[in-house]
Image (spheres, rainbow, N blue to C red):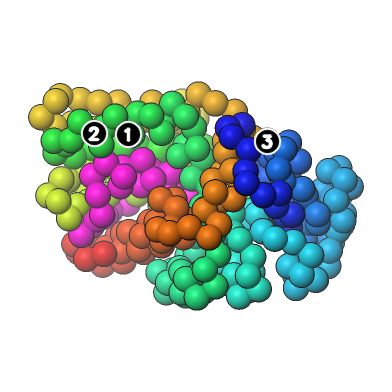
Amino acid sequence: MGQTVAMSLRFGLFGTGPWARAVHAPGIAAHPDATLVGVWGRDPAKAAAVAGEFGAAAYDDVDALLADVDAIAVALPPDVQAEIARRAARAGRHLLLDKPLALTAEAADRLVDEVEAAAVSSVVFFTNRFQPNVDAALAEAVATGGWHGSRTHFFGSIFQPGNPYGASPWRREHGGLWDVGPHALSLVLPVLGPVAEVSAMEGPRATTHLLLRHDRGAVSTMALSVDAPPAAAGSEVTLYGESGTFPVPRGDGDRVDAFGLAITRLAAGIGTRPPHDVGVHFGRDVVAVLAAAERARAAGTVTPV
């Protein structure tokens, strides 16, 4: 779980879906310096069920839950998340958010403005960034330097029978670009730096293919899908450059423990500057790339970020 936090945080959980029940709620409940106070969901019956399972109260009013907590954890569709997160920041609550931060760059910018005005701590839970073996590998890659680019694929197959995430309307509408694209970018941007421009095209089974030129000159490629054939499901991130090739490992830790580390880092960021390296500022940068890629895919042109 990592080191304990400097203060105990009372959390409100927003969301009642499979990710909230499998990761967020148990992660908060297991953390020695966090308490799950209440749960809000768009379906009151589901909110009551999750709250009952984890010894919390169910809330039917967003602002009432915000009034009773220090921080929020969100497992909701990105557009719903962005609005609730802005309200929470205005109320002075710290933010543990999911990816992507929002579905437009404008919405992400508005949230960053609220966080800066309120001076609250924020963390966006890019799952792999809270896996110690992945974190160590990225630090090694940054220290090595000399990278010319990377090749990446993230292939999910969520629309198979029994997969709970296949029932998510926003994932079906926005596809792999917005669902697994943030995971891919969270592993590449820390090493190759910000993206200056992007081109994109769509392949079979709604696979989005990206070509990214980074500010420092590196060029990376990505293939992203949540409707890949089951036999092709999996992911790979490989850097290449002056030192040869460097495969970024998959996370080998438990995702609930990873969420616990995110809680620890959220608390550690309270009252500190600069912002956390995977806070809303980084989350906004990821959204800007995704939005530019969406425009490029639609127009068939190279698009600045």
State the image coordinates of residue 97 (x, y, percent, origin top left). 57, 55
Identify which residue is drawn at 87% across, 45% down: 55
Write down the quadrant of residue 58 in the picture. Answer: bottom right
State the image coordinates of residue 41 (x, y, percent, origin top left). 76, 60
Q: Which mark is residue 139?
A: 1
**Residue on which the image places disc 2:** 143
Q: Name the kind of residue labelled 3 in the image.
A: Gly
Q: In the rendered view, tell whether residue 303 sits above or below residue 229.
A: below
Q: In the rendered view, tell whether residue 61 sits above or below residue 125.
A: below
Query: Is 273 left, or right, of 166 in this rendering?
Result: left
The crowding category of the residue bearing disc 3, from other C-alpha atoms within 10 Å (few below 14, some 14 to 19, many at least 20), is few
Query: Is 47 left, or right, of 86 in this rendering?
Result: right
Q: Which mark is residue 168?
A: none
Query: Is 37 left, or right, of 27 in this rendering?
Result: right
Q: Quadrant of the N terminus?
A: top right
Identify which residue is drawn at 42% across, 72% down: 109
Q: In the rendered view, tell whether residue 283 sits above or below residue 176.
A: below
Circle 2/circle 3 CB separation < 8 Å: no
Element under label 2?
A: helix
**Residue on which the image places disc 3:** 162
Q: Nearer the viewer, residue 200 or 220?
A: 220
Report how far apart the C-alphas of labels 2 and 1 lie in the structure: 6 Å
Circle 2/circle 1 CB separation < 8 Å: yes
Element under label 1?
A: helix
Identify which residue is drawn at 29% across, 29% down: 140
For residue 202: magenta? yes
> Which is nearer the N-term, disc 2 or disc 3?
2
Report how far apart the C-alphas of labels 2 and 3 lie in the structure: 42 Å
State the image coordinates of residue 171 (x, y, percent, origin top left). 54, 53
